[in-house]
Image (cartoon, rainbow, N blue to C red):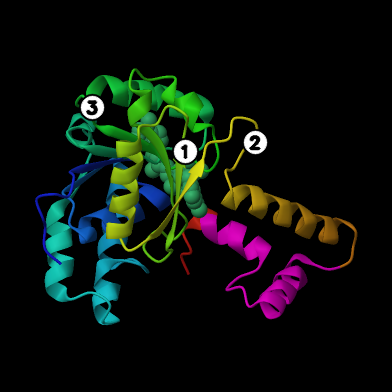
Amino acid sequence: MTTTSELPRVGVIGAGVMGSGIAQVLALAGCETVCFDISKEALDEAGQAVRGGRYGLDRSVELGKTSRDDADAALARLHFSDDIAEACAAEVIVECVPERLDLKIQTFRDLDRRAPEGAILASNTSGFSIAGLAASTDRPERVVGWHWASPPVISAFAEIVRTKQTDESTVVAVRDLAARCGKNPVVINDTAMHWGFVANRVYSAMIREAARCVDEGIASHAEVDQLMVDCFRWPVGPFGMTKGATTGWKK
Ligand SMILES: NC(=O)c1ccc[n+]([C@@H]2O[C@H](COP(=O)([O-])OP(=O)(O)OC[C@H]3O[C@@H](n4cnc5c(N)ncnc54)[C@H](O)[C@@H]3O)[C@@H](O)[C@H]2O)c1
């Protein structure tokens, strides 16, 4: 895969479990990508994960999923930076800071101030109202949810969340970019009343019931996980899913 001029420059804000993987995917898809974090340690770890981590590019080459040339080209396109201005010099910015509403709002205000006019601001929030984040900017028509799943390199999940104010061109640009990243984008409507759009609302209902089985003494965490894996051929049970999602599925 080579860089093509029609692909946007992308900024990724937050280089943690999600941001580092998302930046890797976007760079491999052909986007010039800058991944910003306030923590130098997080930036170092992200760089190591992208190169030599369990889902990193070296491993992908070893497994024959990516050619060495494509991996090297992706590494050349991906820069980690502690300067937010570098990440904001982009047409699409994907916000991946921790799931705290005050932080998300503050980050969106800042991105709106710094990003070029017309740049798309996408949030990887697991469930905060996208309309709420859009309201903290002067460009609600360019704000959209782009919810990824962990690990971003592997998962085909792309929940694209539009608000009543999101412009159709914004939705199309992000949906097409997600497809270009090899994902299966599904465009859904924002929810003002609930946390979690579709995937996490359904997942939360399932995890509540799984926890109830443990609380009632019916089964242990490990037994619940095993039963669900065997019964539904899930790759991992509900508790294993929670652990993996928060740790980045590191072995
Ligand atoms: N982990 C998952 O499975 C998963 C899946 C889908 C969506 N999400 C969502 O993705 C977002 C990020 O989650 P994560 O698991 O990657 O968290 P994480 O804690 O691994 O990473 C967050 C990173 O953001 C950095 N950060 C904090 N404040 C910042 C700021 N002001 N500017 C820039 N960087 C900042 C932190 O230093 C950290 O490196 C959250 O909204 C989360 O709900 C997570």
Q: Is residue 165 in sight in this rendering?
A: yes
Could you tell me which secondary element the residue under label 3 belongs to? loop
Residue 1: image x %, image y %? 15, 67
Q: What's the amino acid at mark 2?
A: His
Q: What's the amino acid at mark 1?
A: Pro
Magenta segment, which residues? 219-245
Which of the four quarters of the rendered structure image does ligand 1 lie in?
A: top left
Mark closer to the chain start, 2 or 3: 3
Residue 238 vs residue 153: left or right?
right
Which residue has dot 3 on it?
Answer: 115
Which residue has dot 2 on it?
Answer: 194
Which residue has dot 1 on it?
Answer: 98
Could you tell me which secondary element the residue under label 1 belongs to? loop
Q: Magenta includes 226?
A: yes
Instruction: Check the image and name the residue furthest to the front.
Output: 168
Looking at the image, do the residues carrying marks 1 and 2 touch, with CB atoms under 8 Å apart? no
Q: Magenta includes 237?
A: yes
Q: Nearer the viewer, mark 2 or mark 3?
A: 2
